[in-house]
Image (cartoon, rainbow, N blue to C red):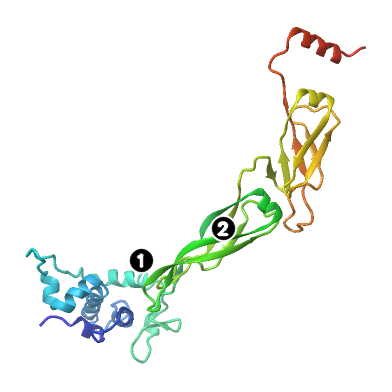
Amino acid sequence: MGKDYYAVLGIPRSSSSFEIQKAYRTLALKYHPDCNNRPGAVEKSKEIAEAYDVLNNGYWKAIYDKFGEEGLKRGIPDSNGDVSNGYTFHGDVDTVFRKFFGGDNPFANFTDLESNIDIDGHATFGGIQGRAQPKQDPPIERDLQLKLEEIYNGCTKKMKISRKILNEDGQTTSTREKILTITVGRGWREGTKVRFTKEGDQGPNRIPCDIVFVIKDLPHSQYHREGNNLIYQPLISLVTALTGGAVELLTLDNRLITVPITDVIYPGREIRVVGEGMPLVDDPNERGDLIIRFNVSFPAVLNPQQKQLIKQALVVNI
């Protein structure tokens, strides 16, 4: 007669996956050689590990439930008469233990187990029987790309995420979608992070990670920003640069403003318009400046007559 894996774990054959795992957790902590030096603990620990290794695997469990230990380890014939490979326990108690509890050191997340045995001989930790201390994965960062208009005026963004949710059995998961709402403040700087705590995947002995959205500026056809200032780089003709004129531009809140050019403009010269930049994060009613950084278009070719006229116009009489 083969081994009764259910009897080894002390559970009925109708036990659910959750009940199988619960039984293994209790017995693995009670009989593990690192915390139990009583005679027979090593062999008992191997029996427990093997029983769990089989019953926690849907494929091996189905074969065992139908054909018993003999069919499980010998292999069973398929429709063509070929015999499948049978099950062989690798014999490593710690491998099963680590896979269940997590960590390279099976007891790295436990206090002194020998001094934490309850009246039934069950190891305890932090008031929770036989559970490893949950670990949290590093945050997941995603770019949140925004138009300058959205940052200038403020906006609300709704981001859809897919995440794994722990089912009622405490072990399996299912995928669900969720909408995260981000209220973008006026003038938020590039690199600003919005953190949603514990919105990552759920799992056994696992703290969901945080999801972090990082603000990124999308390229704009007219402006870019430097700190709280907006930079506009128009291309003006040489005539306008020398004789004056005006620059018209549409602001990020759709106002048309006109900036007069009264001085001679050379390439790279700047005109600062106070208070027409990005809203300040600490006080959105205050704004940085608009800096107009000029580029001048020079003619590619001048004929002799044009050259002479320019010389006459620009000659300095002493």
Q: Residue at x 11, y 74 (%)?
A: 71
Mark 2: few, some, or many residues within 10 Å (few <14, many ≥20)?
Answer: many
145 shown above or below 107: above
Q: Which is in the foreground here, disc 2 or disc 1?
A: 2
**Which residue is denoted by mark 2 in the rendering?**
213
Task: For the N terminus, give its image quadrant.
Answer: bottom left
Q: Residue 109's spot in the image, x, y percent?
A: 41, 73
Task: Find residue 93 and report its image quarter.
Answer: bottom left
* Nearest to the observer: residue 304 or residue 141: 304
**Local SS, label 1:** loop
Amino acid type at image mark 1: Asp
What residue lies at 83% left-to-right and 27% top-to-bottom? 264
Decide which of tag 2 and tag 1 comes sooner along the chain.
Answer: 1
Q: Which residue corresponds to mark 1?
A: 104
Question: Callout 1: few (<14), some (14-19), or many (20+) C-alpha neighbours within 10 Å?
Answer: few
Give the x, y percent position of residue 48: 24, 79
Viewer-side residue, 305 vs 107: 305
* 88 lies left or right of 128: left
**Which three-letter amino acid code belongs to the residue tagged 2?**
Phe
In the rendered view, tell whether residue 282 sits above or below residue 232. below
Coordinates of residue 134 in the picture (x, y in percent): 44, 72
What is the residue that sits farthest to the left in this orientation?
A: 81
Local secondary structure at mark 2? strand
Q: Split into 4 quadrants, where in the image is the C terminus? A: top right
Determine the residue positioned at 69% across, 14% down: 301
Name the outermost residue toward the right. Answer: 318
Q: Pinpoint residue 37: horizontal percent, then vertical percent.
A: 28, 81
Q: Quadrant of residue 23?
A: bottom left
